[in-house]
Amino acid sequence: MQQRRILIIAAIVVVIAAVAIFQATRPRAPVPPAATLEIFSWWTTGGEEAGLLKMFDLYRQQHAGVEIINATVAGGAGFEAKPALKARMLGGDPPDSFQVHMGRELIDTWVVTNFMEPLDELFRAEGWEQAFPAGVLALLRHEGSYWSVPVNIHRANVLWYNKRVFEENTWTPPATFDEFFALAEQMRAKGITPLALGDVGIWASVHLFEVVLAGVLGPEQYNGLWTGATDWNGPEVRRALETMARMLTYVNPDHSALSWDQANDLVIQGRAGMTIMGDWVDADNLAKNFADSGWAPPPGTRGIFVALSDSFGLPKNAPHREQALAWLRLAGSRAGQEAFNPVKGSICARNDCDPGLFGPYLQSAMQDWERDQIVPSLAHGAAASESWVALINDVMTTFVSDRDVAKAQAGLARACVEAGVCR
Amino acid sequence: MRLTSDRVLAAFLIAPSIAAAAVFVYGFIGWTAWVSLSNWAGLRPDLSWAGVANYLGLFANPRFHLDIRNTIVFTVFLLAACMSLGLGLALLLDRGVRGESIFRSLFFFPMAVSFIVTGVAWRWLLAPGDPATGRLTGVNVLLAHLDLPHLRWYTDHTVLHIHPDGALGQVLSGAGLGALTDPTVGIPVAMLSIVIAATWQMSGFVMALYLAGLRGFPEELREAARIDGAGEWQVYRYVVLPFLWPVTLSALIILGHISLKIFDLVAAMSKRGPGFATDVPAYFMFETTFHADRFAQGAAVAVVMLVSVSVLIIPYLVYSMRRETAT
Amino acid sequence: MTRVAASPLAMAGRALIYAALVVAAAFYLLPVYVLVITGLKSYAEAGLSQMWHLPAAPTLEGFQQAYARLAPHFANSITLTVPAALISSFLGSVNGYILAKWRFRGADLLFTLILFGMFIPYQSILIPLVDTLQRVNFAAAALGVPGWLSWAIPGYGTIPGLAFVHIVYGIPITTLIFRNYYATIPDELLDAAKADGANLLGIYRLVLLPISMPAFAVVLIWQFTSIWNEFLFAVVLTQNPAVRPVTVALYNLAGSYIVEWNVQMAGALLAALPTLLVYVFLGRYFLRGLLAGALKG
């Protein structure tokens, strides 16, 4: 009896070991061809993935025989991908090129720490100093050099609503905060959640805060926050926090369990009236066949374009530098941006893309992009370094639940000091 | 002669494990402690001396206060829930129940599942929805059927604490203990959802421990107590439970050190939670080190965690060692 | 007949016991029920609001998609778990043998020091660990280690590296269980073998190994499940999606933008399946070993 059991166990061990040996000795992905291109990003679903794959197709047409490794790590706004990338870079295993938010995130995390190659030659050869708008070039530059190639522009400050619901109730999108609160009261009376929020991982609340900041402070003072010119202890920031606190009384109670797209679902279903989120919502709506989508600048931000951009850089010691440079050339080209952006649901970083390729929302965004004053996004790495954003994330996590304005303002001021920008 | 060569061989065979412990446990702990005393913030290592600045920063950080509160609440509730459920089920199963092995397997199988799977499943089960707009979801659907109130589970930012204006609060304030009325010494309701999920996973383990202990219980003892006139309850209270004390101690230690270190479940279920209601030191350490690149700060969190676990474990290890040497 | 009728109280008591057990069973089965029915639903049907409804048209779509996305990670988990469990069990067996049967001065203290490694929060060694394994990569690159030897390089971001870490930090628990198991074996058995001229290795091979199977069963099951289910080391040490084990893949499945609940639930079930099967078929050994092993320490 005992012996039979031992035999059974031994048999199981042998089988498992055989599988393991088989697995371990199985030839790994056939020896990679000399020409390989590994691109790291967090574009794993929907239009983002489709857009990336379109660029890969273009690349393959131009460079036959190069094998592309699509190294992706899923997770909203790169939350999971960024630590993964850091670990790879620190471990001396850089991908050939990687997705990174243009602005402070790129500069403070990667450039000042000496992980990147400057791209000045590429910008000159491709004539990109003419192709990209001055505001974008300013965000790309650090110590006189360019460090990444922006492939798209997203707008962070968009108020999304359900046109059918608004028409039924003869509502119009609010242009001021007063209008917003009046409308929110009406919505609540109808049993509709006024503002849908999905802030699992907290960044969506920080996103909402940056939009409120821009709306209350206006572009100049908003920009001053990131240089220390605007006082975090001042009355304007206080007013922004008070406004945000009041807005939070109109959000769905389960916001901390939802992601941004689940919050958008509430708008699509007509259970919520509005949501304030970046313009990737457009792609989500298209994917969900939602035809009644309406959009407007959130209160106080008409004429302001809170921008963020996905860009690609060239790490030092990229294993396939030639292929990586060819990839960057494609990412900055008109053909590349026209292939990528209509599918991804963003506008081109270049000035010369054909509007006819884009849907109605993106066409309106392209117009705003040319007219509006451009300011950098906080939640998406353009305005502040990652460690500063992390501190602000912590302040907002507490603020969203206790809405204590004074405490939050003190925390924000302290964060600016800790980030080394304020004194 | 042979005896000595055997001794050399013994030393040779155990040396790799000792070396591994020396380097990978003690050496690395020292290394981490060193990092925690440095200025390392940013991707490039910077081991210049910062003294205890990181620890001072940590203990001044309101988030870390909440983490400590949450860990204590989680540990206390998890131990209470798992021990009572585990013991209760073991006592029931020990009464010669038909289908015992089936029940035992049912209660025990969650132990085989990873915290990630548990977190994914319970995040879905306890998704709160919003009854105001008719979104009833998860367990709340069952509660509604039973006419029970709607619960906000892990999105509830309520912290149960002594209200400063209440009778007890005023007494405490009068006694100079006003600090006890602060929400940082309260019970974050959201944490109890994590306790439910963790209890689902771990209570079967406690049951199995107790069941194994009960199987070793000598019937004569029970008989002797009965002859002395003890009732059924008294037999349990005065004979069985004391007999099970070593099991209880082991279970407390095993659960306790797991709950002080809890990470996966929180990461998969609710992350930091509303207003840090489910944030724990391990998750804070992960975010601060690998998201915000504040390595020195992260190392300080790790050292604090190590100290808290050591306070529990070292006396237990010493006790075990002494007891063994004695026998 | 009369006896049964005479004890309605006892019968009510029995009924209460069963009722309590059934309620408890329902609690433990609740997540399983939801995992299974949601996994069998289509994407359209798997909404939060119809969570308790049985699938109207059961489909394996969710399982197929989850399998497609998790399959490579399953292979990674197997490649990781099996060698790591076998090697750490073997090391534990040797350590346990020496610590239990070749007791030297300070053996108990040494054992306790080794044991401590099993309780530490791994956060407290994580930063040096990452650093050290990265150095291994650089060293291997500098030495020009050929590709066919890569399985032997426990570097950062590789399965061998992760397996190595699990072996090292698995030593305390495996040593504990084996030491306590071997302590129950009478010294006379060993003395007899010694008298026959067997040396340290001979005694191990001839006397202890053949009767070690129950302890090996316990240790292997324990190590297999804990390594399979482990998350912290896996998420920190394997950043390349190609080498990530299944727990990390499942976590990422849950964290992606579009929440496909049916795929997620099916994935959770699939990821749990191997360890569940081990417990269903071999759980007896584990339970039996529990007291003999972990408790006596």
Image: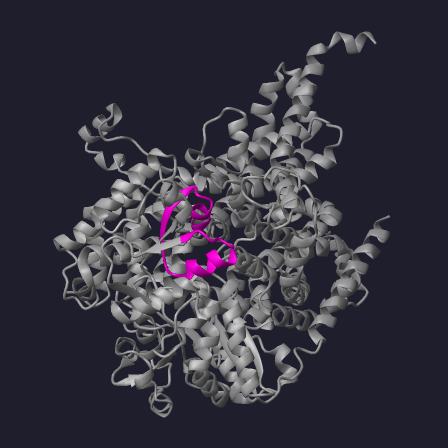
Q: How many marks?
A: 0
Quadrant for residue A363, please give it. bottom left
Specify whether residue C296 is in view.
no
Quadrant for residue C140, please give it. bottom right
Residue C274 is left or right of residue A52, and the answer is right
Residue at screen point 19% across, 53% down:
A410
Q: Nearer the viewer, residue B139 or A146?
A: A146
Q: Nearer the viewer, residue A129 or C91?
A: A129
Residue B319 pos. (x, y %): 50, 46
Q: Nearer the viewer, residue B40 or A33?
A: A33
Residue at screen point 36% across, 78% down:
A350
Residue at screen point 31% across, 76% down:
A107
Residue A22 pos. (x, y %): 74, 72
Q: Is residue A297 magenta?
A: no
Residue B106 pos. (x, y %): 67, 39
Residue A317 is left or right of residue A394, and the answer is right
Residues in magenta, as a range: A264-293
Residue at screen point 53% across, 75% down:
A54
User: Does B225 appear above or below A281?
Assistant: above
Q: Where's the C terminus of chain A, which quadrant?
A: bottom left
